[in-house]
Amino acid sequence: MDTVSLTGKELAAAINADTKARAATLTEAGTAPRLALVVANDDPASAWYVNSLRKAAERLGIDCDRIDLGADASADALRAELAARSADTAVDAIMLQTPLPEGVTLDDVSSSIVATKDVDGVSPLSLGLLAAGLDGFVPATSEAVVELLKHHDVPLTGRHVAVVGRSNVVGKPLGQLLLAENATVTIAHSRTVDLPAVTSAADIVVAAAGRIGLVTGKHVAEGAVVVDVGTNEAADGGIVGDVEAESVRGKASALSPVPGGVGPVTTALLMRHVVVAAEKARAE
């Protein structure tokens, strides 16, 4: 079987073109959209991602401020910074970059981001709005999975989707988004008993557990669609996903590449969220 590559570059380009035009309209009307990136780590992969976000923002006409609190920042310091940026009318959007300092979790600090600026949908209020089907920003990676499948004309209504991963930033919100598309959803994880039996019963498998090679050919039914959300650092310094791609190709009908699949769409959606936040702020 030929396995189609679910690339995200064309979709990301289309989203970016729309975002750039909308950002230009805001700038011409007075001020450019502004994103505050709050960082509290010294992780090389995180630094690379933050840099890529800043470059993307610059290309699209979005002002981007990096606020580096250091890898030893306390929860109190993070909460104070996030609250200050939330209250700052010059800031339209806030993103808190992970990982966080040792002993600090997203649950400890994310509620300090006001929902109207929480463009990556990480706060309890944002996640609650999503669960209730109300308007708010949703985690961009979860949204990117759904948008990527739609872009490649993969039907979701009535399909069984197995999501491997239960984080609040990907797995759980993705389950909510898929339910809204009328899919039947199973949330599995690394401790699921007989994971291959669960995933091989699905029409679509989404690997989002953050473990290299967790999903292999034995986890996938013949003809299934596989979306790889993983971005793990390989031994050679490259980026690899959660799917053992070679064992899945030829069995799956489609597979998203890493890199070049979900990643570029996620970044594009984050930038679009920034512009949406700015548009709403200007309309108030």
Image: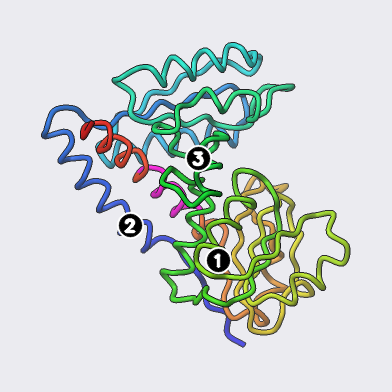
The quadrant of the image that shows the N terminus is bottom right
Q: Is residue 138 left or right of residue 196?
A: left
Confirm whether the magenta stretch covers residue 266.
yes
Quadrant of the rendered structure where residue 240 is? bottom right
SS for dot 1: loop
Question: On residue 121, which mark appears?
Answer: 3
| Residue 14 location (% of width, % of height) | 30, 59
Name of the residue lying farthest toward the left: 28
- Residue 204: x, y in percent? 62, 72
Observer-side mark, 2 or 3, equals 3
Q: Residue at image x 18%, y 36%?
A: 26
**Residue drawn 45% across and 27% down?**
114
Q: Are marks 1 and 3 in contact (CB under 8 Å)?
A: no
Out of 55 and 111, give the one closest to the viewer.
111
Give the Cα distance between marks 2 and 1. 17 Å
In front: label 1 or label 3: 3
> Which residue is pictured at 77% across the width and 55% down the height?
189
- Pick whichever, 282 or 218, lies toward us: 282
Mark 2 burial class by Cα count in 10 Å: few <14, some 14-19, many 20+: some
Q: Magenta region: which residues? A: 263-271
Q: Which mark is residue 195?
A: none
Q: Secondary structure at mark 3?
A: loop
Horizontal arrangement in the rendering, residue 160 relative to residue 13 (left or right): right
Q: Which residue is mark 2?
A: 13
Q: Which mark is residue 256?
A: 1
Number of disc labels: 3
